[in-house]
Image (cartoon, grey):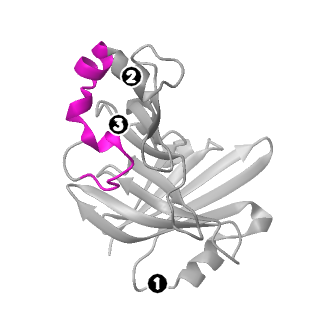
Amino acid sequence: MSTQIKYTDIFGRPITEQEQNTLHDFKKMTFISNEIKTIEIFENVGNIGYQSAKYFIDATENKKDIIQKYVDATTNSSLMIYSNKEQANGFDLWDWESYEDSSQISFKGKEVFDSELRTIFSCSFDRSTNSLLKGARKFYYANQVSSPADDLLLKFTYHANGNVNLIFDSNENYGYIKSISLATFLDDTDFSQDVFPWNEHPYYHSALPYLPTGSL
C-alpha cells in the first residue's frame, strides 16, 4: 500500500510541505492507495492551538482505538469518524460521528464529497430520533480553480423538513452580499433562469436526495 500526504491552507488551496511549516492554520490529508484516510486540520485562535481530524474508517479497524488516538480534551482535539461509504455518479456519501471526548458521540450526520474531496452536501441528525436537523447544506462549484473556497459559487441551506431555507452567493459573483430566500432568487429571472437555471438543477431543490443521482 502506498501512502501520499498532501497539504492545503485552511481554505483548501494546495501548499507545499515547506509552506505548511510557516503556517499556523493548515490541513494535512493522508491517502492510502489513492483513497482518503485522514484529513487533519490545525488552527490557532489567539495563542491557543486546536486540532481536529476526519478519519475514514474501514471494516478492519476498531473505532475505540481511533478515538483514543485522536481525541484528547486537554489538547483541544476533536474527531469525526466517517463510515458506511456509498458511491454513485462519482460522489461518495459517508455517515459521520463527531467526538470531543471519548465518552459519547457529540453529533452525527452525513456528508457527500465529489472526486476532488469537495463537500457537496452536509447535514446533522438528532441523536435520539435520527431526524434531519435544520441547517443541512448543499454546495455548487464553478469548476474553474483548485481552491474549494474560491471556486464555490452557491450555497443552499435547508429547513428540517428538507425545503430550501436560504441561498448564498458565496463569493458575491452575482451581486448578492447577503443571503436570499428562494422566492427572491426565483424573482430574479436573470439569476434563476439564465445564470443558474433552477429547473436544470433539481438536486438543490431539497435536502433530499443526499447522494446525487446525476450531474449537479
**Mark 1 lies on residue:** 61
User: Mark 3 vs mark 1: which is more N-terminal?
Assistant: 1
Q: Secondary structure at mark 1?
A: loop
Q: Is residue 105 something that shows in the picture? A: yes
Q: Residue at x 33, y 32 (%)?
A: 145
Amino acid type, mark 2 = Phe
Tag 1 or tag 2, which sits nearer the N-term?
Answer: 1
* Residue at numbered disc 3: 140
Image quadrant in which you'd find residue 148: top left
Q: Assign the C terminus to one quadrant of the image.
A: top left
Which callout, 2 or 1, points to the residue nearer the camera? 2
Instruction: Say which quarter of the image contains residue 185.
Output: top left
Q: Nearer the viewer, mark 3 or mark 1?
A: 3
Label disc, if present, on residue 168 of the rendered structure? none
Q: Is residue 99 left or right of residue 173?
A: right
Depicted 160 relative to depicted 74: above or below: above
x, y percent for residue 152: 40, 33
The CA distance from mark 2 to mark 1 is 46 Å
Q: Which amino acid is tagged 1?
A: Glu
Magenta span: 189-212
Classify residue 152 as left or right of residue 106: left
Residue 208 image offset from top left, x and y in percent: 35, 52
Name the residue rendered at 70%, 54% in the picture. 50
- Rate crowding at label 2 as few (under 14), some (14 to 19) or many (20 or more) other CA atoms within 10 Å: some
Is the residue marked by circle 1 packed among few (<14), some (14-19), or many (20+) residues within 10 Å? Answer: few
Q: Neighbour class for label 3 at 10 Å: few (<14), some, many (≥20)?
A: many
User: For mark 2, what is the residue?
Assistant: 185
Q: Nearer the viewer, mark 2 or mark 3?
A: 2
Marks 2 and 3, the one that precedes in the sequence:
3
